[in-house]
Structure formats: structure tokens, C-alpha cells
């Protein structure tokens, strides 16, 4: 039989829906999440956390609930940032910030994490501590490295760490998992080309990077075919390009390109970057251009630790969640992989159903129906790892 709801969950859910909608209406881009962190802190303060750490890795936030006895530190983590994509949802909580939207589910992830804090305010962990960690700059890959290097997090002696991501198209509320590799490694790759500008009436006097840029884009978008690589192991795609500085009377003298490289492994990604570097240098040489190219904002592959994942699966079944093993690792990446390199943990998916739209699509919206099952799972995990005091014991 599934575990019964934590005490107070039915009454809490309307407040959590309101919190998610408020966050969704006012999204913050990576590195600018101070208002979102403040909104979460305002929500959690009445539940009397034992410690609050602000400014982790920039705008990150950690909210700590201590037990009355020594024990492990369990971390539940979620992301703070939105994406620079216009929200075209039709709900009353549609983004009010032009060109920015919570179209990856982070508003729902952080609401679940905050909801756990609300439940722990009424029933504390018995042993150790539970940390609610809200990470900044997940979309750029810069947040998690800064967070794990902050001595204030290190001093908490993290034990096991958990996180999840909404996954559209799978049955609503189903828990989706993989042993070992869950999500690919990825990095941005930047290319700068420098030629020579000229008057538009005398293009031969210049050295335009236009053809080289087009050739490099084609290589990125068809990398597997060009270099005989298995698309089941590697992927690349041009994401942004800028040619020249003016649109009238001048031929371009410079170009800039940003691409995304992905691989099933960290070593595979490093090898892919090496191939890209040689490819860009050769194309630039053929066109008589100077060039610079480099990877940045790398995100390692996310690997699950068996013991942590087995615990998640056991607790999921205890709460009545449908459990589905995925055939393949996710080709997208998440900076949870940075944390999982240092601490044992589990990262899993929760099915978003068919009606929520696609991740990073203009009409994506985290389904409010996921809040309750995710919270049940998290609360049971706390009970299994840290124990739970009786409601009247503190």
C-alpha cells in the first residue's frame, strides 16, 4: 500500500501552486536570480529553518533544517534560473518578463524543494541535517562549480544529494531512472574569426569570413557525417552566429559563432573538442583568416550512484509511484553532474505527461499535478536517511 500523505500536505499544496505561479510570472536569467532566491527565502522563513546561507555561487541559496542528533547531511537541490526564450503560455501565470521564461521546469523543481522545507518545519529531521540547495546559473553551467567551491557548503559535510528533472511525454508522475549514466556531458564552444572589412563596392579589397563561417556551421551541424562519428555517442550543433558589424556599405571583417558539443562521456567530450579545434583552425587557414576557438561552461556527464538510486527507487515504490527504467541516457545535460562527481547522489526524471509542452519550447509549463508526488517521495527519503521527529517533539 502506498504511504499516506505527510501531515499538512493537502493544505500546503494550494500555497505551493501559488508560489510556483509567482515564480513563473517573474523569471530571472542565469546570474540574475536574486529576486527568485528572495521569494523562496520569504516563503521558507516562517518555517523556522536553523540556518540560511545566501549568495552561494552568486545568487544561490541554502536553507538548513537540523536534527537533534548527529547524523548525515542530505541535500535536495534544484535550479533557480530561467531561459532567454519568450513564454507563449496561455495561463494567468505566464511570464511577465519579455523574452524570458521558466520553460525548463525549474520553477516547479524549486517549488518542490521549498515544499519539503515547509513540511520539515512541522516535522524536523531526527538526525543530521537536511539542506535545501537552490543552484544559480544551471543553464550556463557556471553555477554548480561555484557552489561546490564555496567553503560554506563544504563545511556542511554533504552526504547524499538528490535532484530531479521534469520529462515531458512520459506518464504524468512516473519516476524515470537509469543506473550509471543518466545525462550526457556538454560544453559551449566559441569560435572567433578575423579577416578584413572593406567597402561594399570593393569586396575584393577585404577578406570576409562569411564562407568560412558557413563551412564551420555546416561542420557543426553535420559533425558525425563529416568525421565518421557515431551519433549515438556524440552530437554538435551551431547555436548562435554573428557576421560583421554593419549591415550597409561594408563587407564583414569578423565573425563569431557559439556551438554546443555533447558526448556520452567526459573523455569523449574532450576528444570532440580537440577535433573541433583542429577543424576550425584548418578552415580558417584555407580562407586566410585568423581565428581563436575554445570550450567554456563545460558540464560533466551525470552518473547515478547505485546505493542512492536504489534508495530512491525503493521510496518511489513505497509512495506508489510508477517506476520506469529508461533505455538510453538523456542527450541533454544538467550541472547536477558537477555535484555527483563529489558526493554520492541520484538524479532522476518525473514524467510531465503529454500536455505540458516540450522542454525549452515557448509553451512549456511545469504541471502542478507533479508537486504532490514529488513531495511525497522527498519526504519519505528524509525519513529513511535522517529519520523524522514526532510532530510535537520540537
Image (cartoon, rainbow, N blue to C red):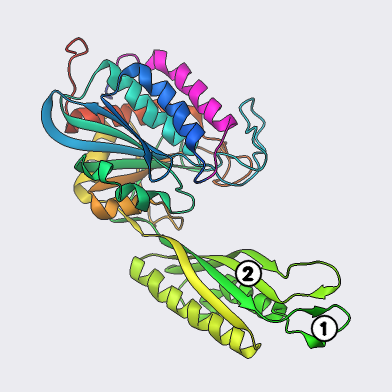
* Viewport quadrant of the N terminus: top left
Q: Residues within 10 Å of mark 1 (few under 14, many from 20)?
A: some
CB atoms of marks 1 and 2 within 8 Å:
no
Residue 25 on the magenta span: yes
Dot 2 alpha-carbon crowd within 10 angstroms: few under 14, some 14 to 19, many 20 or more: some
Snapshot quadrant of residue 378:
top left
Farthest-out residue, top: 392
Check disc 2 and report its element: helix, strand or loop: strand
Q: Sequence-wise, which precedes: disc 1 or disc 2?
A: 1
72 to the left or right of 220 = left
| Mark 1–mark 2 distance (CA, rounded to whole Å) | 20 Å
Magenta highlight range = 6-29
Name the spot of residue 130 as percent of width and height, x first.
Answer: 24, 31
Residue drawn at x 64%, y 43% is: 362
Residue at x 23%, y 37% (from the top left corner): 74
- Above or below, 37 relative to 225: above
Relative side of 7 to 350, left or right: left
Residue tagged 1: 203
Q: Residue at x 43, y 19 (%)?
A: 13
Rendering coords of residue 246 (x, y %): 78, 67
Would residue 304 be found to the left or right of residue 298 on screen?
A: left
Give the main secondary structure, helix, strand or loop, of the magenta stretch. helix
* x and y, in percent, of residue 8 in the image: 34, 14
In this orientation, which residue lies closer to the viewer: 119 or 53? 53
- Name the image quarter holding the C terminus: top left
Query: Label 2: which residue?
Result: 256
Left of 285 or right of it: where is 30?
left
The reply to whether residue 209 is visible in this rendering is yes
Amino acid at each position: 500500500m502506498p504511504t499516506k500523505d505527510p501531515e499538512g500536505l493537502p493544505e500546503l499544496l494550494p500555497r505551493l501552486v501559488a508560489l510556483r505561479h509567482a515564480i513563473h510570472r517573474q523569471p530571472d536569467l542565469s546570474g540574475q536570480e536574486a529576486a527568485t532566491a528572495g521569494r523562496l527565502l520569504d516563503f521558507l522563513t516562517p518555517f523556522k529553518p536553523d540556518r540560511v546561507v545566501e549568495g552561494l555561487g552568486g545568487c544561490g541559496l541554502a536553507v538548513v533544517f537540523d536534527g537533534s542528533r548527529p547524523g548525515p547531511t542530505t541535500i535536495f537541490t534544484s535550479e533557480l534560473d530561467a531561459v532567454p526564450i519568450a513564454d507563449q503560455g496561455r495561463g494567468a501565470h505566464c511570464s511577465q518578463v519579455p523574452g524570458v521564461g521558466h520553460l525548463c521546469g525549474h520553477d516547479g523543481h524549486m517549488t518542490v524543494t521549498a515544499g519539503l522545507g515547509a513540511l520539515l518545519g512541522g516535522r524536523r529531521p531526527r538526525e543530521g541535517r537536511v539542506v535545501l540547495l537552490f543552484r544559480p546559473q544551471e543553464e550556463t553551467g557556471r553555477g554548480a562549480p561555484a557552489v561546490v567551491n564555496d567553503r560554506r557548503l563544504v563545511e556542511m559535510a554533504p552526504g547524499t544529494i538528490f535532484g530531479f528533472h521534469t520529462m515531458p511525454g512520459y506518464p504524468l508522475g512516473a519516476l524515470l531512472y537509469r543506473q550509471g549514466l543518466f545525462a550526457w556531458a556538454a560544453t559551449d564552444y566559441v569560435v572567433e574569426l578575423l579577416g578584413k572589412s572593406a567597402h561594399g563596392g570593393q569586396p575584393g579589397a577585404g577578406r570576409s569570413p562569411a564562407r568560412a563561417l558557413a563551412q564551420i556551421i555546416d561542420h557543426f551541424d553535420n559533425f558525425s557525417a563529416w568525421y565518421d562519428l557515431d551519433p549515438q555517442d556524440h552530437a554538435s550543433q551551431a547555436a548562435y552566429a554573428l557576421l560583421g558589424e554593419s549591415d550597409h556599405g561594408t563587407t564583414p571583417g569578423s565573425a563569431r559563432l557559439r556551438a554546443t558539443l555533447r558526448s556520452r562521456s567526459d573523455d569523449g567530450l574532450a576528444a570532440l573538442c580537440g577535433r573541433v579545434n583542429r577543424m576550425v583552425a584548418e578552415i580558417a587557414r584555407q580562407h586566410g583568416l585568423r581565428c581563436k576557438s575554445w570550450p567554456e561552461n563545460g558540464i560533466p556527464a551525470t552518473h547515478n550512484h547505485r546505493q542512492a538510486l536504489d534508495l530512491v527507487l525503493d521510496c518511489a515504490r513505497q509512495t506508489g509511484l510508477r517506476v520506469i527504467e529508461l533505455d538510453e541516457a538523456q542527450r541533454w545535460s544538467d550541472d547536477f553532474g558537477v555535484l555527483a562527481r563529489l558526493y554520492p547522489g541520484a538524479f532522476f526524471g518525473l514524467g510531465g505527461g503529454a500536455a505540458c509542452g516540450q522542454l525549452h519550447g515557448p509553451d512549456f509549463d511545469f504541471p502542478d499535478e507533479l508537486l504532490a508526488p514529488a513531495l511525497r517521495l522527498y519526504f519519505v527519503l528524509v525519513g529513511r536517511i535522517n529519520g523524522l521527529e514526532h510532530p510535537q517533539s520540537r
